[in-house]
Amino acid sequence: MLCCRLPQAVPGPVIGRTADIVTADGLPTMQVDGVVWSQAIVGNTVYAGGSFANARPAGAGPGTNLTARANFLSYD
């Protein structure tokens, strides 16, 4: 019986995080039950539009503390 040993991948160097790196970190911002397709910032207010029905504050569990929103909302 023949067996093949595949080469092991060599991990890349660890680099510091910069603003242009995308991560899966939790963010301290509102959450929606759909998708935000576009955002605009005016002063300290963010306006978000997309395909969603509800929003909840950062850290709230799914389905809790919901505020009805019809595809558009704003937040500080």
Image (spheres, rainbow, N blue to C red):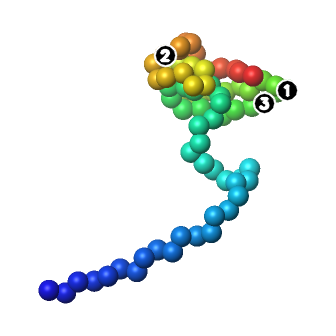
Asked whether disc 2 touches disc 3, contact meaning CB atoms under 8 Å apart, the reply is no
Mark number, residue 64? 2
Q: Nearer the viewer, mark 2 or mark 3?
A: 2
Marked residue nearer the N-terminal end (2 or 3): 3
Q: Please name which of the two marks, 2 or 1, marks the residue nearer to the observer.
A: 2
Q: Amino acid at mark 1?
A: Gly
Q: Quick one: which residue is furthest to the left in this view? A: 1
Instruction: Report the Cα–Cα distance between label 2 and label 3.
Output: 27 Å
On the image, the x and y values in percent for residue 54 come to: 53, 18
Label drawn at residue 43: 1
Which residue lies at the image location 57% right of the left edge and 25% below the top edge? 59
**Mark 1 neighbour density, 10 Å: few (under 14) some (14–19) many (20 or more):** few
Helix, strand or loop at disc 1?
Answer: loop
Residue indicated by mark 3? 41
Q: Foreground: 56 or 11?
A: 11
Q: Nearer the N terminus, badge 2 or badge 1?
A: 1
What x and y, as percent, mark residue 71? Answer: 58, 22
The front one of 71 and 21 is 21
What's the distance in space between the residues labelled 2 and 1, CA to CA? 29 Å
Cβ atoms at labels 1 and 3 below 8 Å apart: yes
Residue 25, horizontal then vertical, whole percent:
59, 42
- Above or below 66: residue 39: below
| Corner quadrant of residue 60 | top right
